[in-house]
Image (spheres, rainbow, N blue to C red):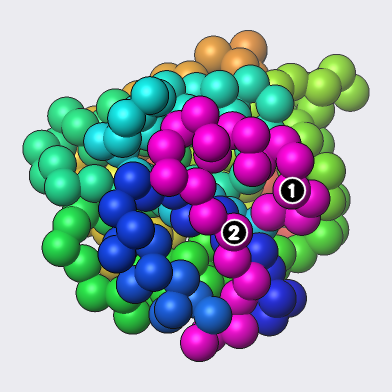
Amino acid sequence: MNKKDKILIVDDETRMRKLIGDFLVANDFDIVEAADGEEALKVFYETKGISLIVLDVMMPKLDGYGTLKMIRKDSKVPVVMLTAKGEENDQIKGFQAGADDYVQKPFSPKVLVARINAILKRNDTSNENVEIGGIKIDKTAHQVFVDDKPVDFSFKEFELIDYLIENKGIALTREKILNAVWNFDYYGDARTVDTHIKKVRAKLGKKGDYIKTLWGFGYKFECEDNKKASKKKK
């Protein structure tokens, strides 16, 4: 992982930006800042090489949800939502808007840095292409192809299908999927997984049937390709 990844910190509180910025700089990150959603959009599009955004929800001019929706029209850059809200519905709203993690204030700066490192590491673990059952994942381009046709996936949807395929044939609990895809210590509502699974299935079309629901447990990715592979191993 590049030790000079550039992080955009968006928060209307100067003190909060300084607190986060100091910890990030101490951990070998470069930082840029914005005080509201409108400024964040301007900085994001004018600054090259932003690796991740730490985005506050409650801000003047344009809140975090609105800012994220605008960014997601053009970019799949990882986004960590930062907010004083702790209700599950607020977290689900953030994830549905395309957030990659959700940190509630007050928080430990060390934990925030750990989460940022975890997201960037997952995003840079492998540049290999994966192909199974007519689904191809180009990890370098962060692109999914179904029967050689490109299909648009959000950042989190991409991570979810990638994780399911990496663990093909393995029964995965919702909790395990949450911890692996949404972060190593994220404890959220299982509905987050169900919502994203539904979206991924729809985008895969008929191949969405490869994602099997294990009632009362979780999910498993299974298709003829990995069944044949399992038989060969035996």
Side of 2 where 17 appears, left or right: left
Residue at 49%, 76% in the rendered image: 24
Element marked by disc 1: loop
View extreme (right): residue:
148
Reading the chain from its start, which is encountered first: label 2 or label 1? 2
Pointer 2 residue: 32
Pointer 1 residue: 47
Q: Find residue 160 and report its horizontal and vertical position in percent.
A: 52, 42
Query: Is 44 placed above or below 98 here?
Result: below
Q: Which mark is residue 37?
A: none
* Rendered location of residue 109, percent (x, y): 31, 75
Q: Quadrant of residue 191?
A: top left
| Residue 150 rendering spot, x and y as whole percentages | 82, 22
SS category of the residue bearing label 2: strand
Residue 47 on the magenta span:
yes
Q: Is residue 117 left or right of residue 1?
A: left
Residue density around tag 2, few if under 14, some if 14–19, many if 20 or more, within 10 Å: some
Q: Closer to the camera, 231 or 206?
A: 206
Gap in Å between the C-alphas at discs 2 and 1? 9 Å
The boundaries of the magenta stretch are 26-50
The amino acid type found where label 2 is placed reads Val
Assess disc 1: are there few (<14), some (14-19) or many (≥20) residues with their C-alpha within 10 Å of its C-alpha. few
**Residue 178 at what x, y percent from top left?**
34, 51
Tags 2 and 1 touching, CB below 8 Å = yes
Residue for point 74% across, 48% down: 47
Residue type at numbered disc 1: Thr
Q: Is residue 153 above or below residue 77?
A: above
Q: Residue at x 64, y 42 (%)?
A: 43
Residue 208: say if magenta. Answer: no
